[in-house]
Image (spheres, rainbow, N blue to C red):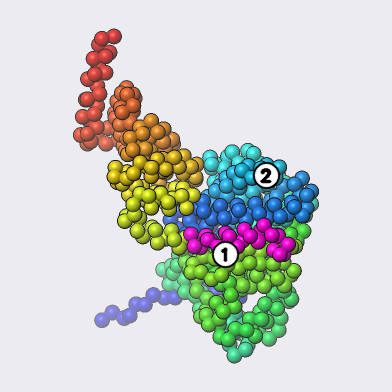
Amino acid sequence: MKPDQTERKVVIEQNKRFSQSALWRMQREYFDKEGINAWVNQVPFYITSNPFIAKCYARLVIAFIRDWTSKHPDAKNHPFYIMELGTGSGRFSYYFVKTLQELLHGMAMTDIKFCYVMSDFTKNNIQYWEEHPMLKAFVEQGLIDFAMYDMEAERPITLVKQNIRLTPEVLVNPLTLFANYIFDTISHDSFAVHDGKLYELLLSLSTDEKNMEHNRPISMEKISVDYSVHEIKSAYYGDPHLDSILDEYKKSLHESSFLFPIGSFHAIKFLKKLANNKLFIVSTDKGYSTLGALDHLGHPSISFHGSFSMMVNFHAIAKYFKNSGGDSFLQTSRKGIKTSVFASGFTFSEMPETSVAIHEYVEGFSPSDYFTLHRRMSDSFQECALETIASHMQLAGWDPHIYLKLANRVTSLVGESDRDTIQFMAHNMEKMAANYYHMPKTECILFEIGVFFHAIKQFEQAEKYYQKAYPYVGDQFGLFYNLALCQHHSNQNEKALENFKRALSMDNSSKETEEWISYLEKPLAEQQGKK
């Protein structure tokens, strides 16, 4: 028998403070290398990048602006800067700015000036945003700008387009920050409580030898994580605001391990200083919001999905804001994501409209509730009648991502559905088209809208959307064939013939296409002969 050939393990690092682990360097390298491709079937992001959550955030910001300008009338003379941390794909940014602009116009608040700052640490993402057609108009209006910002480093933040450096003099109004799925991906420390004592959990990483190349791991998913325990007997950070939280956990937790979002705290401290201590933060992420939820936990687990993420200790972030004179609102526990709101330089008791909006859009029917309902609906779309689908689309704000999942079901139902429902959907197709934020390797909603109008025999509308889809889908048999059919039904037979021929060039085995070409060529030849 051959000897046992077990895979040899390579130790990457041993007994490191979690926030100093090589994992964070690997995380940054992954996002820098992948750029926009990180969000194409790798890093999950839909849950915080849809029209519904954008509407919730826009309502919160509108309420906050109304409260702030009511107390500080001069605020209208200065722009409100809204900065998204770790923007990523930019889809949420587009939905938010579009919705906020609509609300400001609808509520006669056009005297309010704002600038939405899309930020990330990698130039690759900024380059993608600069070239994105759906952001272009907002950039030209000065409503969107871009910035390189690394949450792990205290460096100046300068707007790419306007060449404005964000300073305490520029940030006259409070700085609004959005932190969606970002606090879970920047550095944490890890601790444990046992028998009334506080311990630090130091990290060790190892992997199979085959997973190493050029002295680096190839795949983060194949890294093994182990912890060693070391007692802490004095103030760990030398920061009373942070050390008091650890002291509370030492006294209040019975037996547990927990994460401490030190990277987030460093970023918040820097941004507070930049914004004259005036921050309004909205964050949606997976995490823990209560002391009870933090108790009786095992050692921290790491979720790998191209990159990696961890549960956010929202309870600690809330305590930090309270300890430093600010305020917080933590959504009551729900399964899945949670939305939290934080304030520095004011409290929510001073902000009545903001408080009402928080209770409606964070504690009420929240992004978390929406996603739970959407996930259940997704499981049963093939059983739903068209009126049920239409209602869900209305709730979702005519989200292209959802429609792409059920387009075939909709097409199969239009022949047997009532006229009112069909017209309701047709009326909102333009709204859905306006929500199209193209990303690489994704389906085109404009083509599917064309299919919908084709199915209900509104051929001119179908042709319009097929034409709009062409820049995104390129030369495709289905596009040319469908376009030709619509043009034939609209008595544009010369154009129809041309597109049937283009379709045939894409698939010369299509007998139906050959028959259409023969059918159309004969009368057109006869017309030419008469001339």
Q: Hey, what amino acid is under mark 2?
A: Met
Answer above or below: position of 297 versus 500. Answer: below
Q: Between residue 25 and residue 504, name the one nearer to us.
A: 504
As drawn, the label of residue 391 is none
Q: In the image, is 289 to the left or to the right of 472?
A: right
Q: Quadrant of the N terminus?
A: bottom left
- Does the rendering let one see residue 151? no
Answer above or below: position of 242 versus 166. Answer: below
- Does the rendering let one see residue 398? yes
As drawn, the label of residue 109 is 2
Check whether the beta carbons of the residues at disc 1 and disc 2 lie within 8 A of each other.
no
What residue is drawn where x is 33% and y is 35%?
Answer: 457
Q: In the image, is 299 to the left or to the right of 70?
A: left
Helix, strand or loop at label 2? It is: loop
Q: In the image, is 430 to the left or to the right of 79?
A: left
Helix, strand or loop at label 1? It is: loop
What residue is drawn where x is 70% and y is 71%?
Answer: 322
What is the span of residues highlighted in magenta in the rendered image? Answer: 347-370
Residue 260 image-quadrant placement: bottom right
Q: Locate residue 197, reporting x and y percent.
A: 63, 88
Residue identifier under label 1: 363
Q: Hey, what amino acid is under mark 1?
A: Glu
